[in-house]
Image (cartoon, rainbow, N blue to C red):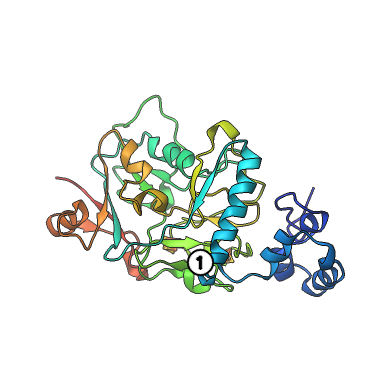
Amino acid sequence: MMSDGERVPRHATSGLEQSIDRRSLLVGTGLTAMAAVSASVAGAAPGFVERLLRERFAELSPERKAEILDRLEQEYSERYGREVSVEDTPALDGVEFAYGLDIARCVGCRRCVYACVHENNQSRDPQIHWIRVLRMEKERGIDFTESTAYYEPPEVPEPDAFYLPVACQQCRNPACVKVCPVKATWQDPDGIVVIDYDWCIGCRCCMSACPYGARHFNWSEPKIPSQEINPRTHYLGNRPRPRGVVEKCTFCLHRTRKGRYPACVEICPVGARKFGNLLDKESEMYYLLREKRVFVLKEELNTQPRFYYFYAT
Ligand code: SF4
Ligand code: SF4
């Protein structure tokens, strides 16, 4: 059994790589680990040295990015026994994504939760859910302290309850980004807050900073059955994550940057979920913000979410 302070085994390539990685250098016993690397780096696999010494993905040349994406595609394809692609589609010019959720329509069925799990390759064991649907009492109104994501009634919706789905709010002023000590997380120009999983050291500062509980930590090696892997992935999104890093919703950037809806929007059986480009005057979200009374969660914290809730009355 490993403790937190021990090394996190990564992709099985070399003995050295299994025993030490960048994360253990930065958060573990740094000097000892560095000495171990110095002594052994000459015999290490090229992939290991590259991961240890390379810059953040966002700062690499296009050629180096292509090499890294190729390596990851090969690694994932071998691991899951099918062809897995890893893209790095950038944010499009003139796009600022935003999300809308109609509380009056949501029936609490949690189909969005499981569509998201499948689309974004979230671990099945232990389970990670980027979306949590909170059950709230109608009588109390929005009250996070009395809400629960663990409800199992015979059927939904329940007459005395309403449901508030919560995921990353893609804040304009993201508390999580400010606290990351290694700049492993940042906001892209389309407003999506992303994480470089190969750069994250797993310190979990961002989880503490996020007021919405939107970030999740991989305490164990994530497990995804080979037959259920979504093979179309993005480097900053739904590619398989290693143990010891943080992850969260990315507005399905691998889909939305190509003009598709997020998986949760497509699956919602009652049309409670809306999505679009705020800079496009023809978009659903532009209309929503102009015509409806919307609100954001924990407005007083000045995080400035791009996730708007409304009641379609
Ligand atoms: S909801 Fe949390 S994780 Fe998402 S941008 Fe805001 S602070 Fe960051
Ligand atoms: S856990 Fe969060 S704050 Fe820490 S390195 Fe990873 S992204 Fe940054």
Is residue 291 in sight in this rendering?
yes
Residue 98 x, y percent position in the rendering: 29, 57
- Identified at 30% across, 59% down, the residue is 97
Quadrant where the C terminus is found in the figure: top left
Mark 1 lies on a secondary structure that is helix
- In the image, taking residue 74 as reference, residue 172 lies left or right, namely left
Residue 178 x, y percent position in the rendering: 48, 74
- Identified at 54% across, 60% down, the residue is 66
Is residue 197 in sight in this rendering?
no
- In the image, taking residue 81 as reference, residue 129 lies left or right, namely left
Question: Disc 1 residue type?
Answer: Pro
| Crowd around label 1: few <14 · some 14–19 · many ≥20 (10 Å) | few
Q: From this viewpoint, which residue is outermost toward the left? A: 291
Residue 54 location, quadrant: bottom right
Identify residue for label 1. Answer: 62
Residue 153 x, y percent position in the rendering: 41, 29
Quadrant for ligand 1 reads bottom left
* Up/down of 86 relative to 278, above or below: above
- Identified at 30% across, 65% down, the residue is 93
